[in-house]
Image (cartoon, rainbow, N blue to C red):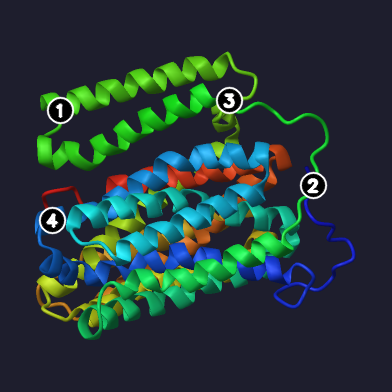
């Protein structure tokens, strides 16, 4: 299967022939980008209205769990069935979950609706990146990735602001209603403008057994990571049982994958140096980003005593620094290469992390913002170049799987970095 012909289109950006597709990808990405920051500042308000304060961490963990376990499946399905139909399904699921979140009558109902959102997000972000890689060359991505990065920059400011404004002055339910028009425009635009040519040859079979084993094993693994260290204890019978069952299912998947010509997740991809390094980097990015996204608002409100709106602005610095660096990284990696770009980014992340160690009960909000801004700059120089390097190392038929592998590792990292149910 091939992507739209780009030879005659020398214009890049929203005004080019591929502009409508790029715009739709930006809107779809905005759904996930807004969700990354808009809910954190409203969690306390939601708990006061719906009760069950001890279940609030599951608003984040349930979403992360659903997203993580579906990413590899979506990536492979996109390589087999095509990007478009899988992407449209993901957007539709996210919108349905958003509507159910907006009308949720209890905390359990809201949590299960977040699961549905996560199932949609599992397709949206990796396929947005995959489609962008399909329709643009590497050199063009260096020039156009600023558009995608700008979504995160705007969302980093708009998300916490809307979350604080809605929770304080209107209703937290608008946090979810705002997704509907954004997602609807993205869905309709992709449906009308994105055309994939018919693939050459017969379609590869879908590995349904592998999908079931991988999803089941991943679900238990992430659940164990979320609950094992706090609610049950790592040595408890519950943790041992869950991790044991996860190992059995994942081992069964590994055996089945070796016997299948076209597995749902090809483990051999990880043996490639570029893909393996990109996956490891994405894992660490997930740990750091969700940990900061969750605990910075809690620290600002609970320790420094500021309101949710100010706490949201403190968090916004993280997701503001990231897209700024991501936009500039294109010129950097075309000049010095992917490896040196990501190395520099790692050192910047380390510097920002050291700054957070200086924070205490008497710190000012601007000190939090400065620390996480530096970390965000480093993340932008690590996450984007390593992903693009992995995508560039494979052909069309493996690009969806490689992108999904990167995102899957990030989701696992987010599960490790998220708050555990029952404890702050």
Position of residue 124 relative to residue 405, above or below, is: below
Q: Are marks 2 and 4 in contact (CB under 8 Å)?
A: no
- Disc 1 + disc 4, Cβ < 8 Å: no
Q: Nearer the viewer, residue 85 or 158?
A: 85
Q: Mark yes or no: residue 25 visible.
A: no
Q: Residue at x 31, y 67 (%)?
A: 102
- Say which label, 1 or 3, has the lower sequence index: 1
Q: Residue 238 — which label?
A: 1
Q: Which mark is residue 263?
A: 3
The Cα–Cα distance between marks 3 and 2, rounded to whole angstroms, is 22 Å
Q: Is residue 303 visible?
A: yes
Q: Earlier in the sequence, mark 3 or mark 4?
A: 3
What's the CA distance linking mark 1 and mark 4? Answer: 21 Å
Q: Residues within 10 Å of mark 1 (few under 14, many from 20)?
A: some
Q: Which residue is mark 4?
A: 424
Contact (Cβ within 8 Å) of mark 3 with mark 4: no
Q: CA distance from mark 2 to mark 4?
A: 48 Å
Give the quadrant of the N terminus.
top right
The x, y position of residue 316, in whole percent, is 35, 75
Is 246 left or right of 320, judged from the image as shown?
left
Residue assigned mark 2: 2
| Tag 1–tag 2 contact (CB < 8 Å) | no
Disc 1 element: helix
Answer left or right for 233 relative to 399. Answer: left
């Amino acid at each position: 299967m091939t992507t739209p012909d780009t030879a005659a289109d020398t214009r890049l950006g929203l005004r080019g022939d591929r502009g409508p597709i790029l715009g739709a990808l930006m809107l779809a990405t905005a759904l996930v980008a807004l969700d990354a920051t808009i809910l954190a500042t409203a969690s306390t308000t939601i708990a006061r209205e719906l009760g069950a304060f001890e279940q609030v961490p599951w608003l984040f963990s349930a979403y992360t769990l659903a997203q993580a376990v579906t990413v590899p499946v979506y990536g492979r399905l996109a390589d087999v069935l095509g990007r478009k139909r899988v992407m449209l399904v993901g957007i539709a699921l996210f919108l349905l979950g958003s509507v159910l979140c907006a009308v949720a009558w209890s905390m359990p109902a809201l949590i299960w609706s977040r699961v549905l959102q996560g199932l949609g997000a599992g397709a949206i972000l990796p396929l947005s990146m995959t489609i962008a890689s399909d329709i643009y060359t590497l050199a063009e991505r260096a020039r156009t990735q600023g558009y995608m990065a700008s979504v995160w920059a705007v969302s980093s400011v708009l998300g916490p602001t809307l979350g604080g404004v809605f929770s304080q002055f209107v209703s937290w339910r608008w946090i979810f209603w705002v997704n509907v028009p954004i997602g609807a425009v993205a869905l309709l635009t992709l449906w009308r403008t994105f055309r994939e040519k018919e693939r050459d040859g017969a379609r590869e079979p879908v590995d349904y057994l592998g999908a079931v084993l991988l999803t089941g094993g991943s679900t238990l693994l992430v659940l164990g990571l979320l609950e094992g260290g706090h609610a049950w204890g790592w040595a408890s019978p519950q943790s041992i049982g869950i991790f044991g069952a996860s190992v059995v299912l994942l081992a069964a998947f590994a055996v089945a994958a070796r016997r299948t010509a076209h597995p749902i997740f090809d483990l051999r991809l990880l043996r490639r140096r570029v893909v393996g390094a990109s996956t490891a980097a994405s894992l660490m990015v997930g740990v750091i980003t969700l940990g900061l996204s969750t605990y910075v608002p809690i620290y600002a409100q609970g320790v420094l005593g500021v309101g949710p709106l100010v706490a949201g602005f403190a968090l916004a610095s993280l997701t503001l620094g990231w897209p700024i660096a991501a936009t500039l990284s294109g010129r950097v990696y075309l000049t010095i290469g992917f490896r040196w770009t990501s190395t520099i980014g790692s050192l910047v992340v380390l510097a920002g992390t050291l700054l957070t160690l200086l924070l205490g009960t008497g710190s000012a909000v601007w000190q939090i913002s400065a620390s996480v801004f530096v970390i965000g700059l480093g993340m932008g120089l690590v996450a984007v170049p390593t992903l693009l390097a992995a995508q560039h190392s494979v052909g069309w038929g493996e690009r969806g799987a490689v992108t999904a592998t990167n995102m899957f590792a990030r989701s696992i990292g987010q599960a490790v970095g998220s708050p555990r149910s029952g404890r702050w």
